[in-house]
Amino acid sequence: MRHTPELSSAQWRRSSYSNANGGDCVEITEDFPGLVPVRDSKKPHGPVLVVPAAVWDTFVGFVKSE
């Protein structure tokens, strides 16, 4: 069984590529070694996707290369 970290005190930061008008924003927190929780800033109490840090790094590298 996978463990979802307690996120109530997480310090979220918005993507630098997010829309300046507050829409289409992705937020992550780097408070959890080895994991990267990701959420939609428009729904801060909505679902959170938690991915391994290595997978997140691969994803970000791919996006930056496009």
Image (cartoon, helix red, strand yellow):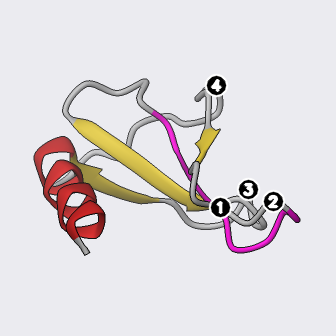
Q: Are marks 2 and 3 in contact (CB under 8 Å)?
A: no
Cα distance, mark 1 to mark 4?
23 Å
| Residue 26 painted magenta | yes
The residues bearing labels 2 and 1 have C-alpha atoms spaced at a distance of: 6 Å
The amino acid type of the residue labelled 2 equals Ala
Judge from the rendering whether residue 51 lies leftward or rightward of residue 14; answer left or right.
left
* Distance from Cα at disc 3 to Cα at disc 1: 15 Å
Mark 2 or 3 closer to N-term? 2
Which residue is at a point 55% across and 36% down the rendered structure image?
7
- Find out whether residue 63 is within the magenta segment: no
Q: Nearer the viewer, residue 1 or 42?
A: 42
Q: How far, Cα to Cα, is label 4 from label 2?
A: 25 Å
Give the residue at mark 3: 44
> Which tag, 3 or 1, sits closer to the chain's start?
1
Q: Main secondary structure of the magenta part?
A: loop
| Residue holding disc 4 | 9
The quadrant in which residue 10 appears is top right
Q: Is residue 44 left or right of residue 7?
A: right
Task: Name the quadrant of the N terminus.
Answer: bottom left
Q: Which residue is mark 2?
A: 20
Report if the CB atoms under discs 2 and 1 are less than 8 Å apart. Answer: yes
Of the 4 image quadrants, the one containing the C terminus is bottom left
Task: Give the mark nearest the N terminus, 1 or 4.
Answer: 4
Q: Which residue is mark 1?
A: 18
When the figure is inspected, residue 22 is found, relative to residue 15, above or below; the finding is below
Q: Is residue 56 above or below residue 43?
A: above
Q: Residue at x 47, y 55 (%)?
A: 38
Q: Position of residue 56 (x, y in %)?
A: 24, 53
Residue range of the region highlighted in magenta in the rendering: 21-29
Q: Residue at coordinates 27% horizontally, 45% vertically from top-left?
A: 3
Task: List the single residue furthest toward the right.
Answer: 21
